[in-house]
């Protein structure tokens, strides 16, 4: 019988996760399939229950469910990193209930290492305060960031948050900027969180966790200003590979996942 996993989110039709996971399943000869599972926020608990009844073995979790899944009645265990981060991107079926894990932060760390971006002692600016930003901030703390500030449109939660109208005062200190909102993601590809009248900090690196499109409007802005920019494809693949291993107990061929992801994006 085919084992099933998939992506919980709303919306999810832009995702290339099925392409990279199903390519890895095929390469390993595993009778597994990865599906897109759009679930409205108001129907999350019932939706997950139905999917479990339909035989699903686990899930990736994306916007807007990364925080909400921690309140699901089906979640009986939470990994220590999830406790620290306050968000999950992976659910694993174990003994009839779900365990919540977070592979986002490890995928982000691995991709920074792959791009030879050093964090130790740097001031880091995170754009957004949602689930992805929580994983990114946790990763940056583990990597030795000197300070981390979050720009947000939401009510300020603590002293590390600030409104976007203060971006011009905060940004010049940043050695790394990480974009963690959905603005600029398909289908709103012409949007950017960065105001045109705010200069980018000189010699900073900009990392955008968005991977559709591969080059976002924000990345184009930063590149024109002379910054080194990195898109979110590497983080996507690396966190996905870690989720794959959580579900199957097998380390997937990351090169196969990268090739499938790039092909799905039309970038060769």
Image: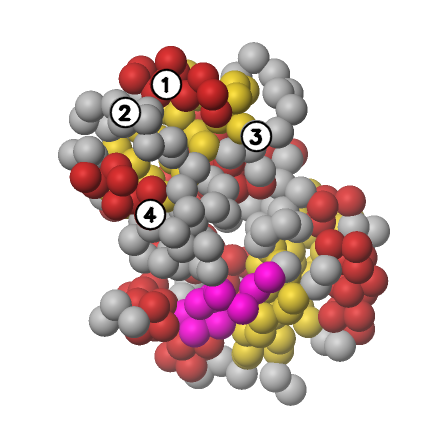
Determine which residue is flagged by label 3. Answer: 153
Determine which residue is flagged by label 1. Answer: 168
Q: Residue at x 58, y 38 (%)?
A: 130
Q: Position of residue 86 (x, y in %)?
A: 64, 35
Question: Mark 2 and 1 residues: CB-CB less than 8 Å, in contact?
Answer: yes
Cα distance between the residues tagged 2 and 1 = 7 Å
Label 3 sits on a secondary structure element that is loop
Q: Which residues are magenta?
A: 11-20
Query: Which quadrant does the C terminus fall into?
Result: bottom left
Q: Residue at x 44, y 25 (%)?
A: 141
Cα distance between the residues tagged 2 and 3 = 19 Å
Vertical placement of residue 168 versus 17, above or below: above
Cα distance between the residues tagged 3 and 4 = 19 Å
Q: Position of residue 185 (x, y in %)?
A: 44, 53
Q: Picture quarter containing residue 148?
A: top left
Label 1 sits on a secondary structure element that is helix
Main SS class of the magenta portion in the image: loop
Q: Position of residue 230 (x, y in %)?
A: 28, 45
């Amino acid at each position: 019988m085919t084992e099933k996993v998939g992506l919980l989110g709303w919306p999810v039709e832009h995702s290339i996760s099925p392409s990279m996971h199903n390519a890895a399943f095929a390469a390993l000869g595993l009778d597994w399939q990865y599906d897109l599972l759009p679930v409205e926020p108001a129907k999350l608990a019932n939706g997950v229950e139905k999917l479990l009844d339909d035989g699903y073995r686990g899930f990736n979790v994306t916007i807007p469910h990364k925080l909400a899944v921690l309140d699901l009645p089906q979640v009986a265990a939470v990994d220590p990193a999830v406790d620290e981060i306050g968000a999950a991107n992976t659910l694993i079926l174990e003994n009839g209930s779900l365990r919540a894990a977070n592979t986002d932060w490890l995928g982000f760390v691995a991709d920074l290492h792959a791009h030879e971006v050093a964090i130790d002692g740097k001031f880091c600016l995170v754009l957004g305060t949602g689930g992805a930003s929580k994983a990114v901030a946790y990763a940056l703390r583990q990597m030795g960031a000197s300070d981390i500030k979050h720009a947000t449109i939401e009510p300020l939660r603590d002293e590390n948050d600030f409104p976007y109208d203060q971006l011009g005062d905060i940004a010049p200190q940043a050695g790394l900027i990480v974009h963690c909102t959905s603005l600029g993601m398909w289908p709103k590809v012409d949007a950017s969180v960065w105001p045109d009248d705010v200069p980018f900090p000189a010699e900073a690196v900009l990392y955008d966790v968005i991977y559709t499109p591969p080059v976002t409007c924000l990345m184009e802005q930063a590149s024109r200003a002379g910054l080194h920019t990195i898109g979110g494809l590497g983080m996507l693949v690396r966190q996905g590979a870690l989720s794959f291993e959580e579900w199957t107990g097998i380390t997937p061929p990351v090169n196969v996942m990268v090739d499938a992801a790039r092909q799905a994006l039309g970038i060769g």
